[in-house]
Amino acid sequence: MSATDATGSFLSPHAVATPPGAEGWEQLYPYYALLSEATKDVEERELWFFDGMHNPSPIYPFDTIMTENWWVACNQLTTRVWQIPPSWGIDHRIINGYLYISPRGVSDPQQIAERAEHFQRRAGHYYANWDEIYDNWIVKAEDCIGRLKAISFAPLPDREQESFVTEHRGLFSSYDLLTSYDRLIENLFEMGAYHFEMLNLGYGAYLTFKEFCQEAFPGITDQTVARMVAGIDILLFRPDDEVRKLARLAVELGLADLVRDTADANALLAAIGEAPRGDEWLQALEAAKDPWFWYSTGAGYTHTDRAWIDDLRLPFTAMRGYIDKLEAGEDIDRPLERVLEERTRITAEYRELLGTDDDREAFDQLVQLARTVYPYVENHNFYVEHWHHSIFWSKVRELGDVFVAHGFIADREDLFLLHRNEIHSALYDLIIGWAAGTGGRGPTHWPPIVEERKRQLAALREWTPPPALGTPPDAITEPLTIMLWGITTERVQEWLGASDPDASELRGVAASPGKARGRAMVVTDPEQLHEVQRGDILVCRVTAPSWAPVFSRLGAAVSDVGGIMAHTAIVSREYGLPAVVGTGYGTQTIKTGQLIEVDGDTGVVRILQEGDA
């Protein structure tokens, strides 16, 4: 299916055909997340782009809790709290199982001015007290995580414990099961609110600095602006730092050969436990795992992206690479000092170009604010999408075990085929059957539904979602859309003319400087990360922060989605790798094994012939 229609615009979202075998897929999702004939005129006038950054695959019914969460949390801050002047937030629709989102701008100058008055006063309070508010934010986030850890689920007993009688509690296991589920869902929405409490302001401060630079220094690139803020030691690099420490310790304790030669994680742990001084290394590993290995291999928005703590292959593979470098006498640290030197040099050079003291003062204030808010923009990801959400998914699996024990589903993973509201109904069915001794309707009701949904999701995975649908606006002004996804007016126009799957050149955002040639490694599933070889050029829809250890083996990176502040861009700059993000069609156009060239200075990716090597 072509991504554009005969008029040169994107296809109408209502013109998208259902993939064969996926008929009836709409029943997997709530009505408010779907296109509607009643709102067709409005939906066709909007631009909808594929959010492969957070949901690269068809969404499981339960996993919609994440998209529904930020649909409210992000937008209420934008529209009702901060009143960000040019933005009415981001709308959502699920199309063929994939999440499409639409940036909604404010065009009325009077309305923008009215919103700006409120924004300056409210945002100004946060900017003026940023460090104190951020410190308190960490307290709130860690408390929310602590309460999440305390939630537990267990099958209902054949007979209630005697203490419920002797202590006159008056409440029983059925009540505990229902309220624990309610607390689980409430906890997710609480963390979702914290997620966006300061995020929009972080992007707003950076965007304001960027706009000042673009006006003061015509022709300055987004990448140059980003390098004036880079070099801050953020939490998202801490897990990789812990892996480096474990690699150094393995060399120090004489365990390097054991780590390098044992691919299976469980076998390695057992072997180290038997080795001299192996207990020292295992203690260091346990100390690092909580919280640093609660690190999702994806964006944290889908249950299928397991955390390092569930699957040690990714950190252990990286560890072996670090051990090889250490024994070869190479430095395994991130080039933080070099990045900071570049930041200082570039900032000073541009500051000197300003003609007045007032301009220099404004520049100093804006760059300092951007550097102040930047750590939160990245650090919140570790607290929210990784630490919290990884524990959240593990708690849902605990609940899945309860449904398996009572015969409602065959496997704990099947619970993700139910929407959270369906689970609440199923829980009540379960406790009715337990209380009355009838067993409930669930064991006959849910298994065929689960199997049908598995079949539909499998068919939806065979469909390739186009990067955009609908009608491009005159201008895109929503800050997150620009900064995080890299969707700009110019990028949309390039997509309109770049849908040729046989194109030998792709254009995107010049995200990290430098030029590299190498073998393409197209990664559409985190499982493929284990196949990455040294010098490969990673081509993906988007990277996750937990992929950072892989970057030590890469020659460059390319992504379908993302802007100058996307994780692919940030991690590439911090590791000194050339990168181009927001290509739209990279994973569709480039094949694993092809020789490609990545120009991180101009934002161009070229597919080369073998003779060009």
Image (spheres, helix red, strand yellow):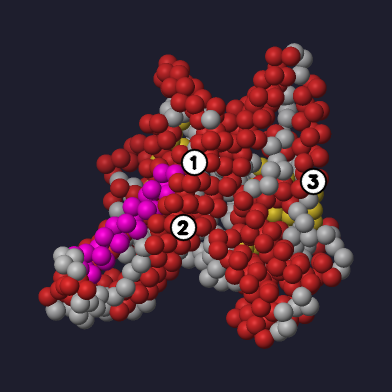
Q: Is residue 161 left or right of residue 312?
A: left
Task: Name the residue rendered at 81%, 66% in the picture.
Answer: 325
N-term mark: 1 or 2: 1
- For this rendering, which residue is in front, 612 or 241? 241
Task: Give the residues drawn in magenta, as a range.
Answer: 171-195
| 72 sits to left or right of 603 | left
Residue 167 screen position, x and y as percent = 19, 69
Quadrant hosting residue 239: bottom right
- Residue 23 visible to the viewer: no
Q: Are marks 3 and 1 in contact (CB under 8 Å)?
A: no
Real-space CA distance between mark 1 and mark 2, rounded to the nearest whole angstrom: 20 Å
Question: Which residue lies under the disc numbered 2?
Answer: 389
From this view, report whether residue 291 is shown above or below residue 226: below
Disc 3 marks which residue?
Answer: 337
Task: State the residue at coordinates (72%, 19%).
Answer: 360
Mark 1 — residue?
136
Q: CA distance from mark 3 to mark 1?
A: 30 Å
Q: Residues within 10 Å of mark 2 (few under 14, many from 20)?
A: many
| Numbered disc 1: secondary structure | helix
State the image coordinates of residue 312 (x, y, percent, origin top left). Answer: 60, 71
> Looking at the image, which residue sits at the far right?
329
Which of the labelled discs sits on residue 547, or is there none? none
In the image, is residue 198 above or below residue 143? above
Q: Are marks 1 and 2 in contact (CB under 8 Å)?
A: no
The amino acid on which the numbered mark 1 sits, given as a three-letter code, is Asn
Give percent across and percent down for residue 31.
Answer: 28, 51
Amino acid at circle 3? Glu
Secondary structure of residue under mark 2: helix
Q: Can you tell which quarter of the image residue 215 is in?
A: top right
